[in-house]
Amino acid sequence: MARVRLVGVEKVYPNGHVAARGLDLDITDGEFMVLVGPSGCGKSTALRMIAGLETPTAGQVFIGERDVTAVPPQDRDIAMVFQSYALYPHMTVRENLAFGLRMRGAAAPAIAERVRAVAQALGLDAVLERKPSQLSGGQRQRVALGRAMVRDPQVFLFDEPLSNLDAKLRVETRAELARLHRRLQATIVYVTHDQEEALTLGGRVTVMRDGLIEQVGPPMEVYRRPASIFVGGFVGSPAMNFFPSGRLLPYPRSSAAADPGPVTLGVRPHDLAIVPAGTGDADARVDVVEPRGSELLVHLRLEGDSDDAEVRVVASPETDVPVDAVVGLRCDRQRLHWFDTRSGKRITPPASASAPDTRRA
């Protein structure tokens, strides 16, 4: 396996569209790195530049210690798995798995042994003589993965590989991928728009927006300490709530610290509690209640809020919250997120300051 590095990588298309802007990313040997972001953020372009399917306008791509920026895809020792399985319909599973090795001129005994080992690892032993049309979606995805594995590449590249699967199969296949990575210790670069997929699979996560890297870090670090308003709003479900400073809580200021200017408070729905009206940090009117089995997702509108912004709270399923009722909202003071409103970047309140308790008696 190998380390992958992007150094100052940019991609500008002939029509002027900038898909990647000065990307610097270091993926360690054996790491499972997930690139995540909304459609058009540049994550697939970054993956395609690692694969050699796109040529950077500027910057360098390294696999191991080798500069592969100008090296064609077939000479990069990578394997790519797409969202479309791209299996040969007239071939059996065994033939699909063996195809790449046959094209490379590998000896028949070596091909047979490698196919046997990969099929066993992926639980495909019983379907080796079937054709793709006779397989379930999950099995087809495993065959596509196996076809990449038999080559034993330095780097695996996955481009939205689970997007064609139903919800149950997505969960099952995610678990299979995680187990496979632990077993192989392979270097994997994985692209998805699904932040839940990113958080559950990635050893580290790279959040992208408009061709830029917003944040890189372990999944729970990105969730617990988002570097920007964008990351806070994109990572986590339901999405983070945002309030201008003072609308729910004032920014904790210190006389010794410089005034940060306009600030925005971020609070995750799990970190807001519903309390009796008049006893929390603000009152809100219940708009919609969504039962979700083990929890309720409650949509509210702050009382007296001119911009009619929605607030989301995750509550216990036993919570009594009739639609149109007025309730109080209370923040978990240990889980507040403050951002510079103008730059969108995370800021840290002065160490000597603490948020005042604004709860009403």
Image: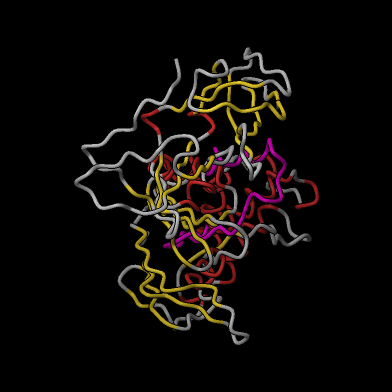
Magenta span of residues: 150-177
Task: Indicate whether residue 161 is drawn in magenta.
Answer: yes
Q: For this view, does 340 lie left or right of residue 289? A: left
Q: Nearer the viewer, residue 12 or 229?
A: 229
Tell me how the rendering is colored. Answer: secondary structure
Residue depicted at 73% across the width and 22% down the height: 323
Residue 8: percent from left, percent from top: 37, 75
Where residue 58 sits in the image (x, y, percent)?
Answer: 43, 82
Q: For the point 57% across and 43% down, which residue is it?
A: 122
348 lies above or below 47: above
Q: Quadrant of the N terminus?
A: bottom left
Q: Position of residue 247 (x, y in %)?
A: 50, 38
Location of the C terminus (image quadrant):
top left
Q: Is residue 22 above or below residue 214?
A: below
Residue 222 appears left or right of 239: left
Nearer to us in this view, 207 or 93: 207
Q: Residue at x 39, y 79 (%)?
A: 59
Q: Residue at x 34, y 57 (%)?
A: 29
Say above or below: 139 vs 206.
Answer: above
207 or 319: nearer the eye? Answer: 319
Number of numbered markers: 0
Query: Between 22 and 89, which is closer to the camera in this rendering?
Result: 22
Residue 193 painted magenta: no
Against 149, residue 306 (above or below) is above
Q: Position of residue 199 (x, y in %)?
A: 49, 43
